[in-house]
Image: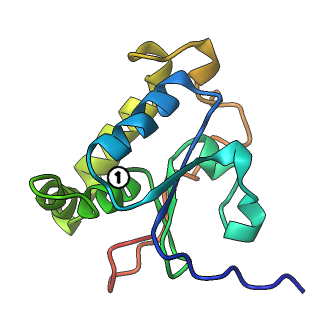
């Protein structure tokens, strides 16, 4: 039996250190004044954190203090909510139900083009459509009480 992970005092942002764009984006987080911890996927025990390894190749996860995980644009919403204003308001807007579809669409576009964006390299390219990690993992059920998946 695996022991339950201990509650974290702050959200933990996980990024792909093998991706130049992801590493660059993770570097912005402290500059925004976010009250989060930032670590690479490669340096953490993802199973112990409850993070789906395959999904983390496609979307950035944030492990919240209570153990829930926010993904993709909802993860960025959590990061921004931990920042001072005006970022906090932007995070609340990004995480709102009205922004679910457009936020997810923009996140998917950025993620699928990250190898072409500043800091991106061929290593940053996402798995192709034939990859077993590609289908349906971008969608998840949301908890209506929290707005998180």
Q: Which of 102 and 9 is in front in this view?
A: 9
Q: What element carries label 1?
A: helix
Vertical comparison of 63 with 138: above or below: below
Total marks in image: 1
Quarter of the rendering containing residue 75: bottom left
Q: Give the residue displayed 65% in from the left and 62% down from the top.
A: 51
Q: Which residue is the extreme one toward the right?
A: 1
Q: As drawn, is 56 to the left or to the right of 131?
A: left
Q: Position of residue 23 (x, y in %)?
A: 51, 31
Label 1 neighbour load within 10 Å: few <14, some 14-19, many 20+: many
The reply, left or right, for residue 2 in relation to residue 45 is right
Q: Which of 103 and 43 is in front in this view?
A: 43
Q: Is residue 2 above or below residue 71?
A: below
The quadrant the C terminus occupies is bottom left
Its colouring scheme is rainbow
Give how far across and how far down residue 30 sits, in percent: 36, 45
Which residue bears the numbered disc 1? 76
Percent from the top left, x then y, of residue 61? 52, 55
Q: Identify the residue at image location x=36%, y=44%.
A: 29
Left or right of residue 143, residue 13 in this image: right
**Where is the N terminus found, in terms of image quarters?**
bottom right
- Residue name at image x 44 percent, y 23 percent: 113
Nearer to the camera, 123 or 8: 8
Give me the residue at 49% from left, 64% from top.
140
| Residue 50 image position (x, y, % from top left) | 68, 69
């Amino acid at each position: 039996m695996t022991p339950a992970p201990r509650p974290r005092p702050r959200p933990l942002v996980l990024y792909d250190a093998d991706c130049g764009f992801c590493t660059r984006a993770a570097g912005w987080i402290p500059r925004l004044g976010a009250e989060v911890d930032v670590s690479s996927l490669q340096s953490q025990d993802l199973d112990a954190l409850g993070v789906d390894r395959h999904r983390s190749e496609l979307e950035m996860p944030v492990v919240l203090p209570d153990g829930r995980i926010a993904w993709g644009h909802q993860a960025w919403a959590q990061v921004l909510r931990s920042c001072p204003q005006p970022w906090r308001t932007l995070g609340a807007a990004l995480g709102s139900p009205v922004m679910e579809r457009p936020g997810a669409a923009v996140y998917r576009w950025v993620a699928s083009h990250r190898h072409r964006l500043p800091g991106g390299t061929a290593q940053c390219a996402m798995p192709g459509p034939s990859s077993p990690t590609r289908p349906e993992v971008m969608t998840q059920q949301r908890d209506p009480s929290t707005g998180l998946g």
